[in-house]
Amino acid sequence: MTDSRYDHARDTVSHVYHDARDKAAETLAASKDSVQDAAHRAAHEIEANPLLVLAGGLALGVVIGALLPRSAKEKELLGPLGTRLSETARQAFAAAKDAGYQELDSAGLTKSAAKDRGKDLFDGVIRALSSAGTAAVQSARKVDAA
């Protein structure tokens, strides 16, 4: 290879190397800036909405906990507690349902009362339609007579 070709190839390789190094440096700087901006935005959101972050963390913990398998020791120690909690929740729900039905009954909002009110409403609509039809027929007769 002649010296001029060698010099030209060396210059080309050197130029490509410097361009690649400059692009890599620019990309690294831009990446650092993006990461810093994201960190600042995240810190601002955490400061602005700490309860939202707490709720998100709790939800994430529940999901992770649900996905992890339980050990035999956990089942042994927490099994009775889970049973007690389930039974307590069932009893609380039943008590709330009964209290709700009692309140509805005392307000007169039973199934039969609702059915009667629906029937009364339907009868009222039928009477209104009948009256409207009668009025329309009488009006049409008056127009024909005139």
Image: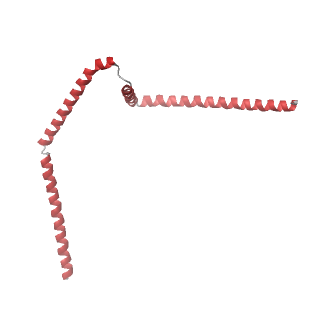
Q: Is residue 128 left or right of residue 32?
A: left
Coloring basis for residues: secondary structure
Which of these two is toward me, 38 or 15?
Answer: 15
Which of these two is toward me, 46 or 57?
Answer: 57
Q: Is residue 144 above or below residue 77?
A: below
Tally of numbered tags: 0
Residue drawn where x is 14% and y is 55% of the image: 119
Q: In the image, residue 132 lies at what x, y percent?
A: 19, 68
In the image, farthest residue toward the front: 72
Residue drawn where x is 21% and y is 27% of the image: 87
Q: In the image, residue 124 lies at what x, y percent?
A: 15, 60
Q: In the image, residue 20 lies at what x, y percent?
A: 70, 31
For the C terminus, give its image quadrant.
Answer: bottom left
Q: Is residue 16 above or below residue 142?
A: above
For the N terminus, give its image quadrant.
Answer: top right
Kindly indicate the quadrant of the structure image that contains residue 135: bottom left
In the image, farthest residue toward the bottom: 146
Kindly indicate the quadrant of the structure image that contains residue 67: top left
Residue drawn where x is 67% and y is 32% of the image: 23
